[in-house]
Image (cartoon, grey):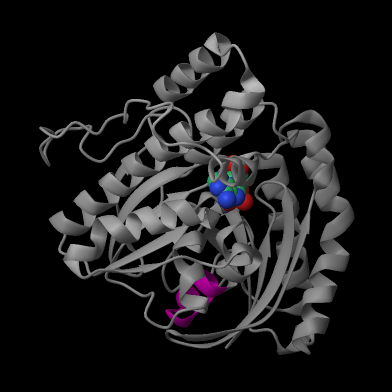
Amino acid sequence: MVVLGIETSCDETSAAVVSGSGDHAEQRSLVILSQDVHRIFGGVVPEIASRAHVTAIVPVVEQALREAGTRLTDVDVVAVTNAPGLVGALLVGVSYAKGLAFGAGKPVIGVHHMEGHLFAQSLEHPDAVPPFTALLVSGGHTLLVDVPAWDDYRVLGATRDDAAGEAFDKVAKLLGLPYPGGRHIERLSREGDPSRFRFARPMLRRNQQPGDDDYYDVSFSGLKTAVLHAVRDSADLERDAAHIARGFQDALIETLAGKVRRAAEQHDRRRVVLGGGVACNQALVNEVEARLADLGAEVYAPSVRLATDNAAMIARAGLFHAERGRRDDWSLNAYASLPLGSRDGGWRKGDGG
Ligand code: KG4
Ligand code: ZN
């Protein structure tokens, strides 16, 4: 089966071709066009993102087909992210995917963006398949998920306020670093002394029990405020910036790694899959590995292109659903938010599309 994937949920216009069957999927092409324009504004401007997708979508899809050596007639299914994300941005991808598929006489399948992130690692590691514990950390989401099988997603915890990437970006801004700031914080942290600024580890009390509602959840707004105070109280920010960055990053990754450890232990998982832009952070990956070492768990972290938003993961998830006969109809819509595991109301199993 050959799947064309399209992703436009935020500020990346991406298309990819994935082919194969079952868990033997091959990425045949992946094109990602990042919208650098948002750097000027220090964050993604939704209307600008939508317009940029409109400009880029046709050449990006054509390039993905060309690089894969595939013609549209060889494609079996078009898979497109239809939730969650910026609704105007999503609509560009969904409308284009539907038009392209309809014109070519192919079916279309809507894919949940976070389900795509769960599948990303399986394109690089044949063992990154369920059952596993997943930590998805990006600019918009922080989700801890138990995945006993594909299509069976049990969300254990989430952030109560800022997403992990958002916390990185806001702290980077406080320290005068460029947007998006995650990788700048990571780089600066390497020069920081971990003992100079020790911030409290949020939502990581030792006496928490599995039934407690904060056992798996995270919260980063208090940490962000603590950093703000440290920045304000610093007599020499140039001298302290690296130490503050280090203190912040240590607190955040220890919290995340602690929650992953709880999830893997409680559900007896031996595999942990990371995803989302913050999974590019090597200190996070190392910390998760260290916290899970005694459980004998394997940690799978994607390469940068597959950790951040991309269409290969959407095509991969689409392949899974297509093989099970799922087809969406032409009423497929875009949704700003949709819980992981639920679908657009337009879909019925066995529906011919
Ligand atoms: O998944 P992604 O590309 O886009 C979405 O938000 O969906 O994630 C982007 C986020 C940004 O907040 C960025 O600062 C963060 O991922 N990020 C990092 C690193 N690289 C990217 N955060 C920490 N360390 C990094 N090395
Ligand atoms: Zn994402």
Q: Residue drawn 70% across and 26% down?
A: 176
243 and 220: which is toward the camera: 243
Quadrant of the frame with the C terminus: bottom right
Q: Residue drawn 23% across and 53% down?
A: 261
Give the side of residue 182 with respect to residue 297, left or right: right
Q: Position of residue 32 (x, y in %)?
A: 74, 63
Q: Position of residue 122 (x, y in %)?
A: 46, 75
Q: Is residue 254 above or below residue 243?
A: below
Give the side of residue 289 with respect to residue 45, left or right: left
Question: Residue 331 occupies which quadrant of the picture?
Answer: bottom right
Q: Is residue 6 found inside the magenta-colored segment of the image? A: no
Q: Is residue 80 above or below residue 343?
A: below
Question: Residue 63 occupies which quadrant of the picture?
Answer: bottom right
Q: Is residue 318 found inside the magenta-colored segment of the image? A: yes
Q: Is residue 93 above or below residue 179?
A: below
Asked if residue 41 can be seen in this view, the reply is yes
Give the side of residue 47 with respect to residue 148, left or right: right
> Which segment did they paint magenta?
316-326
Q: Main secondary structure of the magenta part?
A: helix
Asked if residue 351 can be seen in this view, the reply is no
83 and 352: which is toward the camera: 83
| Number of numbered discs overlaid on the protein picture | 0
Q: Position of residue 310 (x, y in %)?
A: 64, 62
Quadrant of the frame with the N terminus: bottom right
